[in-house]
Image: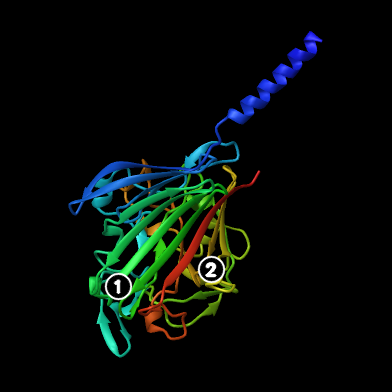
């Protein structure tokens, strides 16, 4: 009888211990990170219940680090970035930032809207506009707000782009939500409104390396679910055509080792693909990236009509480092979900026009999985 009572007691203690074990929930923390333009800059750390962690600063909305597990459970940072605010202020190739008002290029640095021609900053080859101009969204200090619930940690970044900034019309109120979920998804929601007709095309410009930057991305494999792409001229300005990928080096609809295809693309990938599916309805799977040694797979979903796949081959200099590793020679790849480049100058491309009373809203999801 005494032995039975001891067994019952032990079982009760086990139940009580389980019940008292605190449930791991997502968290957000904030630390001072310096100043820019006389404004305070913070580094926010979002962590989900699995220990996946994204570090994001309100300077340019830059994701500086993104720690995820490999097939053995080891955490590594899978994005390229710099070590301090001071390093970012010296200039960088758009590492991990929010790009706007218009990611990618606008030919001739001008467009016409409602009969009015708008001249933009010429910061690409001295003739075109790229990523919104010289003082673009990733050179701005945003207002940050944080929140948490049982399922996700959220950082909301808010910025007002004033009428005439870099030549773009309208006061554009922008909000970008970084949402790290317990499903190991980093969900990025873009929202914007304007007080007069303008164009807007927002994206995140993270450079991914799923090996944790232990190796270049030449050994990564990619698959992009797109039958068509946007051909460009020597300045990477669209010709206005939309062509099939069939028979071209850009056809990566089946798993393709990046290094193998680079032999046919001496300047690397810098190409916009057309997303299949009902854009704007719900996020659709547009691309997958995987690295065999770590077992990591990055899936990209979006509501946007396109994605630019970029391999950064031309960035190499001996001085360039990102968290201690070189960031040239294809040490990172970008999957920039977006509307097509130069859309304001091509009526056959999906429109990027935003008018008063309308709301711009796009969603991109980077989902991490493990191949075991």
* Location of residue 317 in the rendering, given as x and y in whole percent from the top left corner: 32, 51
Q: Most extreme residue toward the top, as rendered?
A: 2
Q: Is residue 131 visible?
A: no
Residue 177 placement (x, y as % from top left): 42, 57
Q: Nearer the viewer, residue 60 or 245?
A: 60
Q: Residues within 10 Å of mark 2 (few under 14, many from 20)?
A: many
What is the x, y in percent for residue 218?
A: 50, 52
Against 40, is 204 above or below? below
* Residue furthest left in the image: 38
Q: Is residue 255 above or below residue 237?
A: above
Quadrant containing the C terminus is: top right
Decide if residue 302 is in sight here: yes
Question: Is 131 on the left or on the right of 76, as rendered?
Answer: left
Q: Is residue 233 left or right of residue 151?
A: left
Which quadrant holds residue 294? top right
Image quadrant holding the N terminus, namely top right
- Per the rendering, the mark at residue 250 is 2
Vertical arrangement, residue 141 with respect to residue 213, above or below: below
SS type, badge 2: loop
- Expressed as whole percent of the image width and height from the top left, the position of residue 128 reads 29, 74
- Which residue occupies 42% across, 81% down? 239
Residue annotated with mark 1: 129
């Amino acid at each position: 009888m005494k032995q039975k009572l001891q067994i019952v007691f032990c079982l009760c203690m086990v139940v009580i211990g389980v019940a008292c074990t605190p449930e791991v929930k997502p968290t957000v923390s904030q630390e001072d990170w310096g100043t820019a333009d006389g404004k305070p800059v913070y580094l926010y750390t979002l962590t989900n219940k699995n220990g996946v962690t994204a570090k994001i600063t309100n300077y340019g909305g830059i994701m500086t680090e993104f720690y995820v597990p490999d097939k053995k459970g080891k955490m590594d940072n899978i994005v390229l970035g710099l070590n301090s605010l001071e390093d970012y202020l010296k200039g960088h190739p758009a590492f991990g930032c929010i790009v706007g008002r218009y990611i990618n290029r606008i030919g001739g640095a001008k467009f016409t809207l409602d009969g009015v021609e708008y001249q933009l900053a010429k910061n690409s080859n001295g003739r075109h506009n790229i990523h919104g101009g010289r003082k673009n969204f990733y050179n701005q200090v945003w207002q940050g707000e944080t929140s948490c619930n049982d399922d996700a940690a959220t950082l909301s970044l808010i910025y007002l782009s004033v009428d005439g900034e870099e030549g773009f019309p309208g006061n554009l109120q922008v909000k970008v939500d970084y949402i790290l979920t317990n499903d190991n998804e980093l969900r990025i929601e873009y929202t914007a409104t304007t007080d007069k007709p303008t164009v807007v095309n927002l994206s995140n410009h993270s450079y991914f390396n799923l090996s944790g930057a232990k190796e270049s991305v030449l050994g990564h494999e990619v698959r992009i679910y797109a039958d068509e792409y946007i051909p460009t001229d020597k300045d990477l300005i669209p010709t206005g055509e939309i062509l099939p990928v069939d028979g071209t080096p850009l056809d990566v609809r089946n798993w393709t080792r990046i290094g193998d295809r680079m032999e046919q693309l001496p300047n690397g990938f810098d190409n916009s693909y057309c997303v299949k599916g009902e854009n704007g309805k719900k996020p659709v799977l547009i691309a997958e990236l995987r690295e065999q040694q770590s077992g990591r797979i990055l899936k990209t979903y979006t509501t946007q009509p396109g994605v630019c796949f970029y391999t950064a081959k031309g960035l190499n200099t001996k001085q360039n480092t990102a968290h201690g590793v070189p960031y040239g020679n294809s040490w990172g790849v970008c999957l920039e979900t977006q509307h097509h480049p130069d859309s304001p100058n091509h009526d056959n491309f999906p429109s990027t026009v935003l008018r008063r009373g309308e709301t711009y809203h796009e969603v991109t999801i980077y989902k991490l999985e493990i191949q075991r």
